Image (cartoon, coloured by chain):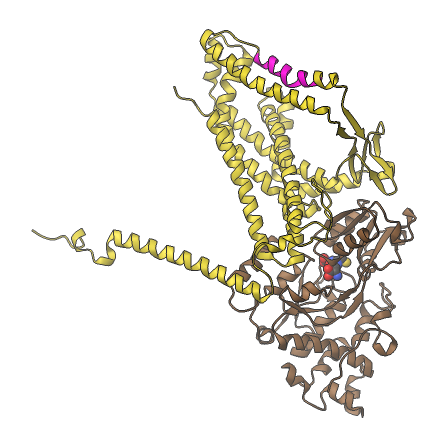
Amino acid sequence: MKLKLLSAVIGTALTMGVAGASAATLDDVKARGTLKCGVSQGLIGFSNPDEQNNWTGLDVDFCRAVAAAIFGDGKKVEFVPLDATQRFEALKSGEVDVLSRNTTWTMSRDTTGGMTFAGVTYYDGQGFMVKKSLGVDSALKLNGASVCTQTGTTTELNLADYFRANNMTYQVVAFQKNEEVLAAYNEGRCDVYTTDQSGLYAERLKLPDVENHVVLPEIISKEPLGPVVRQNDTQWFNLVRWTYYALLTAEELGVTQANSAEQLASSTNPEVARLLGKEGDFGKGLGVENDWVMKILAATGNYGEIFDRNVGEATKLGIKRGVNSLWKSGGLQYAPPIR
Amino acid sequence: MTTVPGSQSRTSFWRHPTVRSVGVQLFMVIAVVWFVVFVTDNTINNMKARNLAPGFSFLNDTAGFDILQALIPYSRGSTYATAFVVGLLNTLLVAVLGIITATILGFLVGVMRLSRNWVIRSSATLYVEFVRNVPLLLQMFIWYKTVLKALPAPRDSLRYDDMFFLSNRGLMSPKPLFEPAALWTLAALTVGIIATFFITRWARKRQERTGEIFPAFLTSLGLIIALPIVVFSASGLPVRFEYPVLQGFNFVGGLAIIPEFMALYLALSIYTAAFISEIVRAGVLAVSHGQTEAAHALGLRHGPTLRLIIIPQAMRVIIPPLASQYLNLTKNSSLAVAIGYPDFVYTGGTILNQTGQAVTIVLIWMGVYLSLSLLTSSFMNWFNSRMKLVER
Ligand SMILES: N[C@@H](CCC(=O)N[C@@H](CS)C(=O)NCC(=O)O)C(=O)O
């Protein structure tokens, strides 16, 4: 970790120009032939490697979608696992092209870090998990507890705010590596484990005795998670952002991985025609082929399909769409029109 | 006369040694200065582009996070600067206690390795060979994991007399709270130390003059230990104890030693002690046996021979490498991050993550560890010069 940091610092010191890498990320990516995508070191449903180092998850699929838009191939991604502390320096120094690692969009990260958030792929909030045997049913009964969490996250800040605001004391035990956090909680070093609620559901699955742990009802913060890019590269920013919007629009218009070819051929809806590149020149503005959305859908399917496949109710995580439903269904996911 | 080709007088201007050396040096200086200016300028520009203010002003902002162990008052509302100080104090705490323990243990094991007793000697060798050859990080994990795994939950703590509790939250013990009258004891201790200093000086001078031996050691013991105890009792034992009590999830009150500290402290002390023991062994072996024989021939008994002849000479061999072990221990303490002990690197890392001030924070890190190292080595150099052979 220190080596990475040092190289990032030397990067800051030595490179001319604005960010660690050159401003034209898209050209770099095209020249390299792969997209470098910063992900977590293993969070089920979001970014998780199997034994053969095949990555799956919502954050992973987002990177595959970006790669598909550029190369027409969702496999042209190199995943770079990063812990919470490393991730921003890795992005800023150009080690990754996009950071898609359950990262919360906050004002300071957006305005002072040399980074820009491209959207919210998952609306989340911070929660608590405790052992059932403690008999606790509300976060407000956690006065005096030891709480395990990961350093370098919004989580440790919200935690401090919440206990302060509710006049409760606590002991924070924070580690840099996520495995250490869970191990410490599991071994009884802490009474409570806290992180984004999606993370709680995912990490819970790694415990040997899932049934003995409960997630408390309180959500103590807003955690809009989404992809991040370096600031001052509008072309790249647009590509990442509109990949996200395309995924949403496809779901909204009912275009899926399975029916996209048929829709392209037979749909009479002009919106579908624009989305799939039959009408208009939308790919050009992004610096990619006009059938970019067809490529995306072939690689990952639309937003709803990505959600259902990785974290949805049919998966081990079993998360409801809730606030992550499309705006038409009362959720927060909303894309500006493609026209 | 024939001229030798390539002789001094014929060397061209560029081959002239003085011109060359001045030229090269000038070039180096210019290159270094240019590099520093370039790097500084670039860094500042890059930071501006990221809306980061160069400099240290961010240290006055609110930290917003809590820290597991703070030796000074600290809360989420404190500044980043305070958070840095908290981390530094945690580093110093583990480094100082680690150095003391490693030194004692190291000397003990070093002497054990020289023992004539097979069991003692071999167990010392086993210790050294095992501990030296397992990576420190691994040892830290072993301590942390086994300590945590083996210990019970707070409710089922191992307890001694409702005063000491050992659980996976750490070791809780009574916390002494001194009343104002305890200042008398402090005064007595100060008087004792100062008096000891003068008495030993006087005793040495007298011995050099007259050869008479004054029992300075016993007198000092009396002054430094017995005197304060007497004063403490006479002033009515001005101390109260705050006992740890199990309340809800955890213990409240008392003095808590967290498991992260224990694991780091044990790992650092035990690891470094293995190296120190080798240094001690080498130091003792370096003093030739003739010295002992000569001392005995002069009629010195075993104790004084060791104290006056062997140890002073061995110390000269021991101190310089000992100093570098102290430096190692201090720097190794930054592995704390791995087991969640909030040392200087750990808190700096958290601040770095919240502020994005990578360059400044890395500079602070380097500056602080450099200062710690320089401080340690200048102290050890001073100590070394005191122990050096005094030539008459
Ligand atoms: N969303 C928060 C926290 C994200 C976070 O790091 N969560 C942890 C706990 S679930 C995690 O994903 N760790 C995985 C890893 O470090 O590889 C943030 O952006 O600061």
The reply to whether the magenta stretch includes residue B224 is: yes
Q: Which quadrant of the render holds ligand 1? A: bottom right
Q: Is residue B151 left or right of residue B351?
A: right
Q: Colour of chain B?
A: yellow
What count of labels does the image hold?
Answer: 0
**Quarter of the figure that contains the C terminus of chain A:** bottom right
Q: Position of residue B266 (x, y in %)?
A: 68, 36
Q: Is residue B162 left or right of residue B361?
A: right
Q: Nearer the viewer, residue B324 or A117?
A: A117
> Can residue A42 be seen from the camera position used here?
no
Magenta span: helix, strand or loop, mainly? helix
Q: Nearer the viewer, residue B339 or A51?
A: B339
Q: Nearer the viewer, residue B134 or B22?
A: B22
The residue at the point 78 percent across, 51 percent down is A182
Residue interval drawn in magenta? B216-229
The reply to whether the magenta stretch includes residue B208 is: no
**Quarter of the figure that contains the N terminus of chain A:** bottom right
The residue at the point 80 percent across, 74 percent down is A333
Seen as rendered, the residue at the extreme front is B180
> Can residue B286 be seen from the camera position used here?
yes
Q: On the image, which quarter does residue A242 sit in?
A: bottom right
Vertical placement of residue B288 versus A256, above or below:
above
Q: Which chain is brown?
A: A
Vertical placement of residue A313 versus A5, above or below:
below
Q: Position of residue B341 (x, y in %)?
A: 70, 44
Seen as rendered, the residue at the extreme left is B1
Q: Position of residue A94 (x, y in %)?
A: 59, 66
Vertical placement of residue A280 versus B123, above or below:
below
Q: Position of residue B173 (x, y in %)?
A: 78, 32
